[in-house]
Amino acid sequence: MKPDDDEITAAEFCLGTLDAAERSRLNDAINRDPALDRLVRSWDRRLAPLGDAVPPVQPPADLWAKIESRIAGAGLPGTVTVRTTQGEWQPMADGVECKVLWQNADLGRQSLLVRIAPGATYESHYHAQDEECVVLAGDLSFGDHRLNAGDYHLAHKGGTHPSASSKAGCLLYINTAL
């Protein structure tokens, strides 16, 4: 005898394999349909001994800490994720602030987000190492040299560029020396 769709769905409901939407739909249907309710209770009686046959297992003491770490953004093994709400913005100059995303002392490098408020300026500075900049939003100008969202800018080691300013404000991703 081949089981019908109700039989299969009732068994999946008891096993806990339905997604949340389907489980909710079936709960509503069980409340309206006495035959479906009996079918689900029948499957529950048949499957319950399976749970009783498995001995209880104490999870490792550090399991919850590992779960919390993954939820907090540990993400994929071998990677670093910094959420929008993580990290602190630090002032660099009037109307200019940065948030450190990553630092590597061995390489002498760091990745930053930099926000420049509308009309703010960041003074000219020397580059001890190559500095990469991507304009994520807004505009950035070095004198007459204007960058817009999506533009990439590389300041080579040993160079100095004019002061940076932004008319509308901007958000930058910068990879630079520590």
Image (spheres, rainbow, N blue to C red):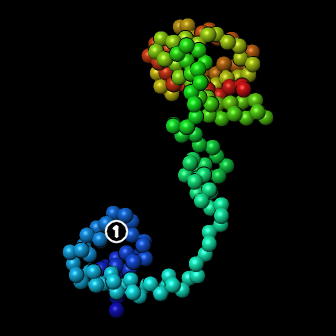
Residue drawn where x is 65% and y is 28% of the image: 175
Residue drawn where x is 64% and y is 10% of the image: 124
**Residue 35 visible at all:** yes
Residue drawn where x is 47% and y is 25% of the image: 137
- Which residue is situated farthest in the bottom direction here? 1
- Which residue is situated farthest in the left direction here? 32
Q: Left or right: 43 with respect to 76?
A: left
**In the rendered picture of this protein, how many numbered marks are placed on residues?**
1
Mark 1, Cα crowd under 10 Å, few <14 / some 14-19 / many 20+, is: some
Q: Which image quadrant for residue 66?
A: bottom right
Q: Position of residue 126 (x, y in %)?
A: 71, 13
Q: Left or right: 35 with respect to 155?
A: left
Q: Position of residue 101 (x, y in %)?
A: 62, 34
- Vertical placement of residue 15 versus 1, above or below: above
Residue drawn where x is 55% and y is 18% of the image: 96
Q: Left or right: 43 with respect to 37?
A: right
Q: Which part of the image, by quadrant, shows the N terminus?
A: bottom left
Q: Position of residue 128 (x, y in %)?
A: 75, 19
Residue hosting label 1: 23
Q: Amino acid at mark 1?
A: Arg
- Which residue is situated farthest in the right direction here? 106
Q: Which image quadrant for residue 103?
A: top right
**Residue 148 visible at all:** no
Residue at disc 1, secondary structure: helix
